[in-house]
Amino acid sequence: MTDVELPITDHLAELRGRIAWVVGSWFLCAAASYAWAEDIFAFLLAPALGALGGEASLQSIAPTEIFFTYIKCALLAGFIFSLPMFFWQAWAFIAPGLYEGEKRFVLPFVFCSTALFGGGAIFGYSIVFPIVFEFFNSFSNEFVISAWTMREVFSLTTRLFLAFGIAFELPLVVFFLAMAGIVTARQMLSFTPYMVLVVFILAAMLTPPDVVSQFFLAIPMMALYLLGVGAAFLVDRKKAAEEEAEETSELTTSD
């Protein structure tokens, strides 16, 4: 860990610079993605159209709705493609406060965090989204016909997409809490009953007000939390072995 403490103004200046890199890469990726905005929109809305069935299509009820929805598609794609830059800059910002041995985790951190976000988004898109939209469409009857607007469906899809992507970062958070020595694996394991409540509350906040999407988000989150606890046990074991080796070395030196 570095012994040089920088003034708060230097930290803020560095933070501004790294945020500028993140925002710049986001908008650059979004601008490049706009050429395929219609294809991105079709990909994102496939589960909803599949639930509606047949030759169903979405509605546009405002003159600017299609244009601004395509811009949002490009921004979403740009956000996803710029995630490696976001995680790289986040790690670079905290790296000066880490030990030399911990700094080598930069590439695994960037890769794992990006892969976890992508895995969560793919899991939600391929498994959960069709079930959620089928659930909402099941309320249609002879009196009411579903005529969803592209803005509302895109908004719901984006919300679920980001919710699953962010939720799947949980094992990485648990791992770094253990690596930083803030909590131990045994403490986190003992906290599991309370974590169940926390996870279901978070799932309720991140998803629409329906039991289906909450359940499909909460269950993987609990599994990922336990996976993170398992990784934390490995961290604790490694730290204990290193401390034991250091004590043995000190005893040998003193003799």
Image (spheres, rainbow, N blue to C red):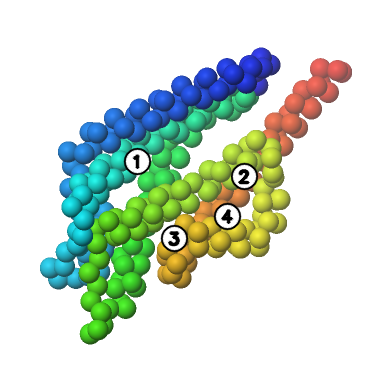
Horizontal arrangement in the rendering, residue 158 relative to residue 238 (left or right): left
- Amino acid, disc 2: Ala
Q: Which residue is found at the position 53% from the left and 47% from the top?
A: 171
Identify the residue at horizontal 39%, vertical 56% (top origin). 160
Nearest to viewer (mark 1 / mark 2): 1
C-alpha span from label 1 to label 3: 19 Å
Q: Position of residue 71 (x, y in %)?
A: 25, 43
- The amino acid type, in three-letter code, at marker 3 is Thr
* Callout 1 secondary element: helix
Q: Which residue is mark 3?
A: 207
Q: CA distance from mark 4 to mark 2?
A: 10 Å
In primary-sequence order, the first of circles 1 and 3 is: 1
Q: Secondary structure at mark 2?
A: helix
Q: Is residue 64 left or right of residue 121?
A: left
Residue pictured at 22% horizontal, 33% vertical: 32
- Does label 3 or label 2 sit earlier along the sequence? 3
To which residue does mark 2 refer?
A: 232
Q: Is residue 223 visible?
A: no
* Residue 80 drawn above or below residue 59: above
* Up/down of 137 relative to 24, above or below: below
Residue closer to the observer: 15 or 211:
15
How far separated are the C-alphas under marks 1 and 2?
A: 28 Å
**Position of residue 180 measured from the top left corner of the image (x, y, whole percent):** 65, 35
**173 left or right of 47?**
right
The residue at which mark 4 appears reads as 226
Which residue occupies the extreme top position in the image?
A: 4
- What type is the residue that disc 4 sits on? Leu
Report if the CB atoms under discs 1 and 2 are less than 8 Å apart.
no
Which marked residue is nearer to the observer: mark 1 or mark 3? Answer: 3
Q: Decide which of 245, 228 is in the foreground and name it.
A: 228
- Between circles 4 and 1, the one closer to the viewer is 1
User: Position of 130 compared to 239: left or right?
Assistant: left
